[in-house]
Image (spheres, rainbow, N blue to C red):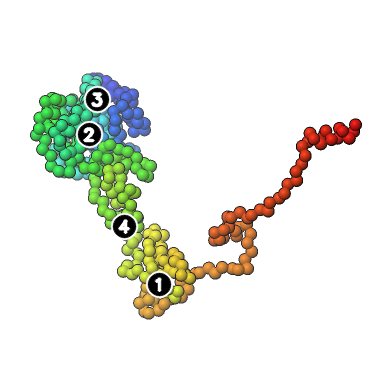
């Protein structure tokens, strides 16, 4: 390897350690850089044929691509490289190498490896400085473009702007419910920014992944950390999981149904196959037990039944429920299904029993008898009387 390339690698790695983020520590000067981090869980398994042949490069936010390292640079995770782009060069950070990068090719569904772009070189000091200047222009470009959109009364929302590493192109991410005519907008933007413009439409879920945030579970959003493909989520996923249809609890930061509703749906559907179907009432000796809800993982079913004209909830195992259903089909009404506790009148009430008692007045304070306190004379007056008698 040439001495110049070695110096460029040292400078790029030093820049990452000082000003950018590393997998173990994130102290970011450029916002939103660590999203969709790739864990190298095959680091101990080295494949010489796969080593540095293909690498995964991450750019701003959730954009990642696979590139071919045709010059066999000694690349590691965190190195800054210049890659091919249309037009010019783009600057990115290596996020995966070796076997992990090969597995990511399957994830991105790349069929023709000949169409994969190539890594041009290790990023030089001039490339990194121009890249930082391009990133600093993104916020001002975003605000100016939003003013242009408002002046043209376009029904769209501009979410983010991403500059290419050489400042020759910018990608504008937007959200729109209807088709938008960009002819006047692109003409004004080209006159003002003097760059090549690419408009890319994204959905509400993609916007949440790019912006990032903390979910209701207290962790980072799944669309920010590991999700790359988004599937539709229906309200049936909540019904199958016995969840209340409360929009405030079921919707995420993108105002759509949470993607995590689909994560455990297959497990719920598989377990629900063990539960009996097409029934709602069990006929037993003390009345009809109406089915209310299920506890999927505990294999329990909850029923409401009236005991002494008071509705109570009782639970049964699914095997017991299947047995009662078969008896009801044969015209048999089982007895003593639910064990009803009868109150013991002769039970002595002590401290423990009073705490476990169902009496609503158990915490009421008993009226204390008022005690009449005797009036005592002041201490000084008694001393004066003693002095008089002594005289």
Residue topped by disc 4: 239
In this rendering, position of residue 216 left or right of residue 138: right
Q: Residue at x 38, y 61 (%)?
A: 294
Q: Select label 2 or label 1 by which is in front.
A: 1
Q: Residues within 10 Å of mark 3 (few under 14, many from 20)?
A: few
Residue topped by disc 2: 160
Q: Residue at x 26, y 32 (%)?
A: 94
Question: Toward which corner of the image does residue 46 lie, by quadrant?
Answer: top left
Query: Along the polypeptide, which appears first: circle 4 or circle 2?
Result: 2
Q: Nearer the viewer, residue 364 or 350?
A: 364
Query: Along the polypeptide, which appears first: circle 3 or circle 1?
Result: 3
Q: Which mark is residue 136?
A: 3
How far apart are labels 4 and 1 at the CA level?
25 Å
Mark 1 lies on a secondary structure that is: strand
In this picture, is 139 found above or below 360? above
Q: Select label 4 or label 1 by which is in front.
A: 1
Query: Along the polypeptide, which appears first: circle 2 or circle 1?
Result: 2
Q: Are marks 3 and 4 in contact (CB under 8 Å)?
A: no
How far apart are labels 3 and 1 at the CA level?
71 Å
How far apart are labels 2 and 3 at the CA level?
13 Å
In this rendering, position of residue 225 left or right of residue 353: left
Q: Which mark is residue 288?
A: 1
How far apart are labels 3 and 4 at the CA level?
47 Å
Question: Toward which corner of the image does residue 280 lie, by quadrant?
Answer: bottom left
Query: Along the polypeptide, which appears first: circle 4 or circle 1?
Result: 4
């Amino acid at each position: 390897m040439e001495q110049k390339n070695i110096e460029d690698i040292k400078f790029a790695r030093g820049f990452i350690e000082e000003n950018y983020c590393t997998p173990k520590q994130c102290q970011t000067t450029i916002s939103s850089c660590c999203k969709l981090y790739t864990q190298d869980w095959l680091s101990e398994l080295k494949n010489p044929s796969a080593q540095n042949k293909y690498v995964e490069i991450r750019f701003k936010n959730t954009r990642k691509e696979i590139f071919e390292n045709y010059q066999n640079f000694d690349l590691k995770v965190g190195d800054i490289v210049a890659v091919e782009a249309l037009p010019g060069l783009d600057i990115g950070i290596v996020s995966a190498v070796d076997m992990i990068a090969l597995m990511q090719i399957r994830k991105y569904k790349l069929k023709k490896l000949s169409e994969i772009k190539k890594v041009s070189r290790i990023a030089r000091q001039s490339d990194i400085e121009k890249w930082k200047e391009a990133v600093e222009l993104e916020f001002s470009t975003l605000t100016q473009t939003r003013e242009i959109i408002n002046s043209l009364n376009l029904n769209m929302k501009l979410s983010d702007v991403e500059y290419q590493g050489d400042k020759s192109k910018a990608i504008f991410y937007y959200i729109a419910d209807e088709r938008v005519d960009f002819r006047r907008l692109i003409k004004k933007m080209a006159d003002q920014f003097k760059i090549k413009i690419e408009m890319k439409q994204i959905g509400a879920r993609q916007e949440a992944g790019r912006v990032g945030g903390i979910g209701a579970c207290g962790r980072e959003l799944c669309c920010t950390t590991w999700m790359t493909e988004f599937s539709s989520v229906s309200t049936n996923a909540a019904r199958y999981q016995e969840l209340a249809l409360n929009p405030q609890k079921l919707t995420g930061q993108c105002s759509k149904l949470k993607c995590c509703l689909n994560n455990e749906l297959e497990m719920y559907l598989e377990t629900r196959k063990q539960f009996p179907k097409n029934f709602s009432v069990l006929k037993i000796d003390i009345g009809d037990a109406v089915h209310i809800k299920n506890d999927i993982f505990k294999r329990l079913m909850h029923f409401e039944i009236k005991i002494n004209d008071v509705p109570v909830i009782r639970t049964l195992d699914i095997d017991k429920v299947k047995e009662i259903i078969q008896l009801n089909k044969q015209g048999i009404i089982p007895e003593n299904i639910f064990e009803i506790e009868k109150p013991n009148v002769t039970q002595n009430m002590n401290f423990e029993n009073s705490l476990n008692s169902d009496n609503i007045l158990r915490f009421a304070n008993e009226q204390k008898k008022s005690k009449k306190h005797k009036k005592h004379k002041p201490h000084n007056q008694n001393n004066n009387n003693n002095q008089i008698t002594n005289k």
